Image (cartoon, coloured by chain):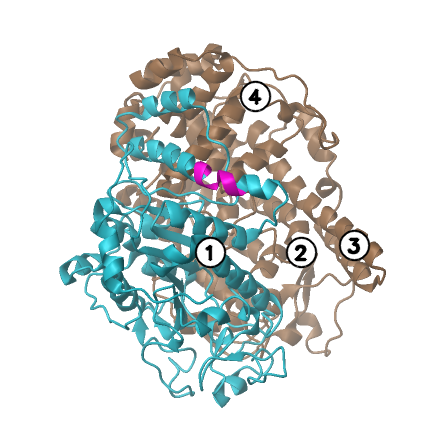
Amino acid sequence: MRIPHVHRRDLLLGAAALAPMVMAGRAFAAPQAGSRLLVVFLRGAYDAVNIVVPSGSDFYHQSRPTIALPKPDPANPNAPLPLDADWALHPALKDSILPLWQAKQIAFIPFAGTDDMSRSHFETQDTIELGQPVGGHRDYGSGFMARLAGILGTGDKPIAFTDQLPLCFRGGEDPIPNLALANVGKPIDQRQASLIQSMYAGHPDLARSVSEGFNVRDTVYKTLDQEMKAASRGAVSAKGFALSAQRIGTLMRDRFNLAFVDVGGWDTHVNQGGATGYLADRMGDLGRGLASFAQAIGPDAWRSTTVVVVSEFGRTFRENGDRGTDHGHGSIYWVMGGGVSGGRMAGEQVALSAATLNQNRDLPVLTDYRTLIGGLVQRQFGLSGDRLATLFPDTRPVDLQLV
Amino acid sequence: MARIASWICISALMAPVPAYAADPARDAAWAERLGWGPSAAPDTGPVPGSDAWLRRQLDDRLDPLPPAVQAQIDAMRISQERVAALVVETDAMQRDLKAITDPEQKKAAREAYQKAMNGLADEARRRFVLRALYSPDQLRERMTWFWFNHFNVQAGKRDIRAMVGDYEETIRAHALGRYRDLLEATLRHPAMLRYLDNDQNAKGKINENYAREIMELHSMGVGSGYSQADVQELARILTGVGVDQKPDAPRLKPELQPLYIRAGLFEFNPARHDFGTKHFLGHTIQGSGFGEVEQALDLIADSPATAHHVSLKLATFFMGDKPPSALVDRMAAKFRQSHGDIAEVLKTMIRSREFSGSLGSGFKDPVGYTLSAVRLAYGDRAITNPQPVVGWIRQMGEGLYDHETPDGYDLSSAAWSAPGQLATRFDIARQLGNGAARLFQPADAAPGTPPPPAQVPVLKDSPIIAARMPMLGKPTLAALGQARSPAEWNALYFSSPEFMHR
């Protein structure tokens, strides 16, 4: 899939040119040429260095005697695929993500993460989703994507493709809708919906969530109706994350432009495998899902779409006693999209050795997630410095020239 | 959430009343809070929330289930076989299936294995639902869900499906006892040891997964003062704590034999243990075997951080978001003074002015929502097929034993009240209201069998609802007034903001 680059100016104009049609809450007009951002959260801390592999490092191979991927070798189907002189990609991503790399539509940011050193999944996921300074008082009612939605104003159409509203989307001015895409049911009849809404009219907490819930259900059902009919006629239907990702693509093409989805199952303490095995299978699913997202959103929208893949932390650089890895620190984030200036490893790097590891245990963090995402949305949505300051307080965005 | 309380107008009626004059609305509010909601079954026991009720709830005696319900539980495989036997048998199925070479036979054997494993987990889910719906021990049942969630395991991992029913029974037995005993009971259970990988934690092959979550989730709480070094030392202390389903003890050197412990599937294998000296939470623990684990658990259970963390979670679970910190402090003080007596901590909470003042202000999570609706509509008839209840809870994202990560389901109202979740809830309200005929199908009906004709309950005429009607808001009464059938009335009532709260 080779898609010409777009000028950044087109992206910026798009967001301003939206003519919102408001129905009892949020706007549901198509985003037209507007910018789109999808954040994919790999919950459980994926083992980054076995996916985007520092294959040039002998220290990597020494540190992982049973789970390291071999050195790149075109003759070996289990070998990772070279990205540059130092890095290589897991073979499970050969057909899904490697083509994006070759099209320069994906960049990897190694040594990325947070300054949260708790090594707790839940604490660090919260840290990322809240986007507030570590160590200060936490406001659990203010997630960074909800703040971004607020900054972007009436033109944006945010949604979480999750069965619970994630922390990052809590605290929006208007309640932000959520919907799990695994089973999209038919909306209930209009009369009952109106009666139910009337019971919540004036309810201080729930009135807007109730009407938003009916709206989003309606919207999603109508948008996906076509696809679901096609699937029921025997078209090949995707499963699991690939199905959700494909639907997300359709919905972001037509309806939503600021979205979040999470994928779990990355906490590989035991028998994680190498070129094949548990982690390889999960990663293959993820890659296929992201590729089907890019397909479904279509070439036009893909040009103005950025997908950011993050995870709470990386894992121990050395394997543990059970052919797995324990909780670590720095991770490797992904930034992909039709307008992304990719095909490269972005951000600061350091040669890997026992001396450069964080606490002699895991990757150091050289690119903070806030500076990365701040820098991205600054360019993509054309945000000024003071508006960014409310998105990520006490953070200076770093412009890695990714979009 | 205080504004919700006044909006719903229940709280004003809930000041503690020493003499328990008949007050069905108050009784219903207490039943919502301390159990799984008021039941349509006539209640002959003490009034919910009264001293006599609380004494009976907190005692060790389990009150009997209705015979028709008990019979369903007795017929389950998980009631008839011990967990060790279930694990050995299903393990053998899996081993045998690996040896099969014929693809067709292998496929059939794999399906039989999966059916057996899923069947065991589903039995446990159905048993949980039956008890929640019909057990007089409502507080114990609610606490069993709470502690399971606190010490969460996911059925889908490894062979935990065969263990999860017994794990829940273990928790149920300790749900109102001492925290220290409960902590050790979960530590000795194969489901926990499998779930957090400690069965693979051995000297020289350290796996710190369980050690970290004990401190972060089960006891002290993240950021409460322990360090990465404490986690690593606890992992060393826990080496050799694992699971063994083989009938015989491993062959050990003579000097290690007295240190070997085996109880059911639980095993402490000294040959896998790191006997070096450890430094944990500021104490030196000499290598001695399983005694080190006991010492570490004592330190963890006695920590003020644990008293506070557990009290805060309990108060949040029963009272809703942001419980008053002064009350949490009093509960934590009681926790320490009573050496983690859970019943005493609960009494401190239940008998507080803050608690009675907050009735009706907590947002129900999906499991509480579903069970309270089924109790209200169908509590006077023994359902024969709990599977739809299991399915509704799962559809709303809080499936029993389904939560993948050890933090358990989120207890905050924001986790369950987002737009998409409310839309799903309204769908389920409709199914709950229309007679839910599938609940009354024979449990062993073949798939596709049409259910018996629905008997739609007339909730409007139930005494519990009659007592609540004066407290419903005007918009709710207006909407209910437009219902065209009893089924629609029920669906609207189950969709109302008043029913969403407890």
- Disc 4: which residue: B378
- Disc 3: which residue: B107
Provide residue B402's location: percent of width, then percent of height: 55, 48
Q: Which mark is residue B159?
A: 2
**Mark 1 against mark 4, which lies toward the viewer?**
1
Residue B329, magenta (yes or no): no
Q: Chain of mark 2?
A: B
- Number of residues whose C-alpha sits closer than 10 Å to that of mark 4, classed few (under 14), some (14–19) or many (20 or more): many
- Disc 1: which residue: A293
Q: Secondary structure at mark 2?
A: loop
In the image, residue B277 sits, relative to residue A340, either above or below, namely: below
| Mark 1: amino acid | Phe
- Marks 4, 2 in one chain: yes
Picture mark count: 4
- Marks 2, 1 in one chain: no
Q: Residue at x 50, y 22 (%)?
A: B376
Circles 2 and 3: CB atoms closer than 8 Å = no
**Mark 3 against mark 4, which lies toward the viewer?**
3
